[in-house]
Amino acid sequence: MTPRGSGVSWKPGGKRWSRARTIAPSLVQRLDRRYAAPEVWSDPKAASPLSDQYAFGTILLELLAGRSLDDDAADLSTWTFDERVPEEARQLVLTMRAPRAADRYPTLEEAMLVLDLLA
């Protein structure tokens, strides 16, 4: 069985599946631009696992801040978090959402290790 969401196969065809692959190119037309990494805006073929990390960081940001990312509120310096959100969690989200892919965690697995340490 292939997992599905938004009408898109989350496991592209073929017998070999690599964790280094990304589903971002197939989702570019379906996702809200706010969840797409900056490198994907101009070139959907530039999508990578780091682009997926950006999208997941955006979801975490919304959960921790308790608000939705609106186009007019993209400046994160104006965002406030509940005082119960640890500074480490804030830094995790900001690193995952770094504008440059090279400034994000090297892999999503590394970001998840940091998240596990916060739990």
Image (cartoon, rainbow, N blue to C red):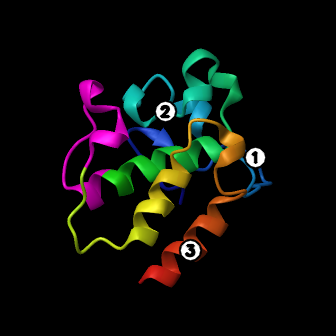
Compute the Cα span from label 2 to label 1: 26 Å
Query: Where does label 1 land, which residue?
Result: 14
Check the image and name the residue furthest to the front.
Answer: 77
Q: Is residue 49 visible?
A: no
Residue 65: say if magenta.
yes
The amino acid type of the residue labelled 1 equals Gly
Q: Is residue 35 above or below residue 49?
A: above
Q: Is residue 100 visible?
A: yes
Q: Which contiguous range is marked in magenta?
A: 62-79
In the figure, 72 relative to 83: above or below?
A: above
Q: Nearer the viewer, mark 2 or mark 1?
A: 2
Point out residue 5 in the picture as x, y percentages from the top left corner: 40, 47
Marked residue nearer the N-terminal end (2 or 3): 2
Is residue 55 positioned above or below 109 on the image? above
- Residue 116 in the image: x percent, y percent? 51, 80
Asked if residue 95 lies left or right of residue 5, the reply is right
The residue that disc 2 covers is 36
Q: Position of residue 46 (x, y in %)?
A: 70, 28
SS under mark 3: helix
Tell me what residue is drawn at x 77 percent, y 55 percent.
18
